[in-house]
Image: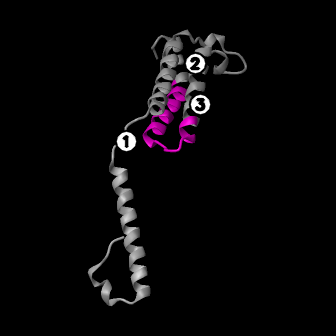
Amino acid sequence: MRKFPFTQQLNKSARSLMGTVGAGIDTVMDAVGALRVFKRPVVADILLLLLPLLALFLWSISLQTVTLNDMNDLGLISALSPRIIAGLAILVVSFAVTLQRQEVRVSLLAFQLICIILILYATPWISTLITRGFSR
């Protein structure tokens, strides 16, 4: 609790109020200082970073096997290999686990979200390019 030099002249109730405000300021300053400290990544953070990379790897090696001739009434999902679907499942599970953690890492969530968007929106575009032979 911080003491101010002019607290001797204040009455008892004002002193308790000033002490409370001083303690609140100290608490806020401690919280700001704690935010500035770099936290070392733990094993769970590293694992939750490697899982999206694994999903992207599975997705990238499986795109070569996609042929649009294999599509049926279900759409593109029927032409995708099981590795692409497994990569997407890994990505969704790692995103859900990251959301459930005590300390939320926004940068990790942003990376996982970018990976999900990349897989969902780039798969039809890239599979069309591969099927047509990169020509317009």
Compared to residue 92, the image places residue 71 above or below, namely: above
Mark 1, secondary structure of its residue? loop
Q: Of label 2 and label 1, which has the lower sequence position?
A: 1
What secondary structure is the stretch in magenta mostly built from? helix
Residue at point 57% right, 12% down? 66
Quadrant assignment, res 111: top left
Q: Position of residue 23 (x, y in %)?
A: 39, 69
| Marks 3,1: beta carbons within 8 A | no
Which residue is label 2 attached to? 84
Q: Can you identify the residue that label 3 sits on? A: 93
In the image, what residue type sits under mark 2? Answer: Ile
State which mark lies toward you, 3 or 2.
3
Instruction: Quote the CA–CA distance across marks 2 and 1.
Output: 33 Å
* Residue at mark 3 to residue at mark 2: CA–CA distance: 14 Å
Left or right of residue 6, residue 95 in this image: right
- Is 54 situated left or right of 76 in this image? left
The magenta stretch is 97-122
9 is higher (above) or lower (below) than 52: below
Crowd tier of the residue under label 2, counting other residues whose Cα lies within 10 Å: few below 14, some 14–19, many 20 or above? many
Residue that numbered label 1 is attached to: 39
